Image (spheres, helix red, strand yellow):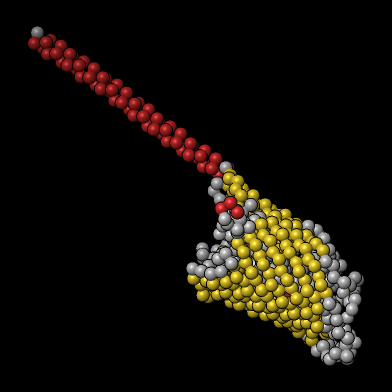
Amino acid sequence: MNKLLRTSLLAVLMAGVSAHAMAQTADERIAALEAKINALTGELSDLKAETKKANQDINKKLSATATLNSGRPQINSADGANRFAIRGILQFDAASYDGRNTVPGNTDFNSGTNFRRARIGVEGTVAKDWNYNLTGEFGGGGGTEAAQLIGAYIEYVGFKPLGSDAMVRLRVGGWATPTGLEDATANTEALFLERPAVAEMVRGLAGGDARSGAGVLANGERWTATAVFTGGLVGGTGEFDEQTGFLTRVAFDPIAGKDYAVHVGGSVQGILSPADTAAGSAKITQVRLRERPELRVDGTRLVDTGALNSGGLTAYGAELGAYYKNLQVSAEVFRIDVDRTGGFNPHFGGWYVQGAWTLTGESHAWTSATGGFRGIRPAAAFNPADGTWGAWEIATRYSVLDLNDHAGLAGAATPAGGVRGGEQRIATVGLNWYPNAVYRFQAQFQHVDVDRLSATGVQVGEDVDIVSVRSQVAF
């Protein structure tokens, strides 16, 4: 009996232990399942959050904002990696010429009007480091120029060999590389209707609008440097081998403060091989130096060397400028050495000095982007109701362009190898009004004095007074 009782008790105990174990195993399984469910729920929440953030990032990258920057329509992607802008320039000039020719009837100047510039273009950025520009010109100079493409290039700005503080642009296409201090100032921001004659002539040797090329443009906080290999002009005709040339320039801002800066710069540029203008096996390479009297309503050029047989030329430039508060002055000097084919090598040159006083206090600040002085922006736009009248400025300039070399004496024939291109001196005073950042009006008076001998030694120079005005819109 005792044995039977012990066996029964043992069986009951084992059954209880087994039931407890089974119950415990079920609880653990349920707990494990709940833990897995919680983990999956957390992972699903994290996945939802990540998906939502990814969608927000995609929408942010795909979204864009449209703005008007000083009247210029511009679209920017939210991340700043892409940009598209439209640019436009319209300059309408009118002039009256009062010519008192040394030789009566020598030149009949055209008093009238001219759309000096009528440009429309697009520019932008793709994938942060790639820029582009495409610009067309529908204006001209004195009826001598037709509509043409003046800017079409691409550039890469992601190369940083000089550190993150320096901008290096690798550019190829057609554009106008600044060839000097005045050329570094935008044509919509210059003090006068046209650049000084010598600066305008030099910029057209191996540079100028729509000059094809490939090169490097770099700048830091207080310096600018360029090196460009150039070819012919976009749309050039009558050439059987295009011109090749080069442009190099450096500019510094050695002294600068809150409201002042000093500019020092220099340039060397040249024509490596002039364009071949002869068809067939014959080869004719020539250079010609000439320029208008700092105005384009009439297209007459009063100084002109004529075509010179040449294997190339080199031009040297030195620059100096400064601004202090609302006063700005600048000057440049150039020398052009021509490598003549046969005979001695002539040289020519010129210089100018100019200054401006902004009556309303704005400054022509220096910028390293081009190595030149910016135009002014009115501190208060024109609004008679508020008693504000925009910005007003007076400016003056004296320039000399000398295209004579071994010219000889009056009354005698040109000496062998001499060049009688003439010497042009121009004194200019101007008044500029900026109603706002988009519109601009200019008025100027010029006295032009040209001393030039004919091949036989007769004086054929000009003495001209010119009054001109310009209306401009630029964005």
Q: How many marks?
A: 0
Q: Residue at (71%, 69%) from the top-left corner?
A: 444
Is residue 140 placed above or below 108 in the rendered structure? above
At 65% across and 62% down in the image, what residue appears? 433
Q: Position of residue 468 (x, y in %)?
A: 75, 66
Give the residue drawn at x 75%, y 76%: 447
Left or right side of 31 for 362: right
Q: Nearer the viewer, residue 108 or 404?
A: 108
In the picture as drawn, the residue positioned furthest to the top comes out as 1
Q: Is residue 330 visible?
A: yes
**Residue 401 visible within the image:** no
Residue 44, image quadrant: top left
Measured as percent of width and height from the top left, residue 281 is found at: 90, 73
Does 207 sit above or below residue 343? above
The residue that appears at 32% across and 23% down in the rendered structure is 30
Q: Identify which residue, 269 or 178, lies in the foreground.
A: 178
Q: Quadrant of the C terminus?
A: bottom right
Q: Which quadrant, please, contains the N terminus?
A: top left
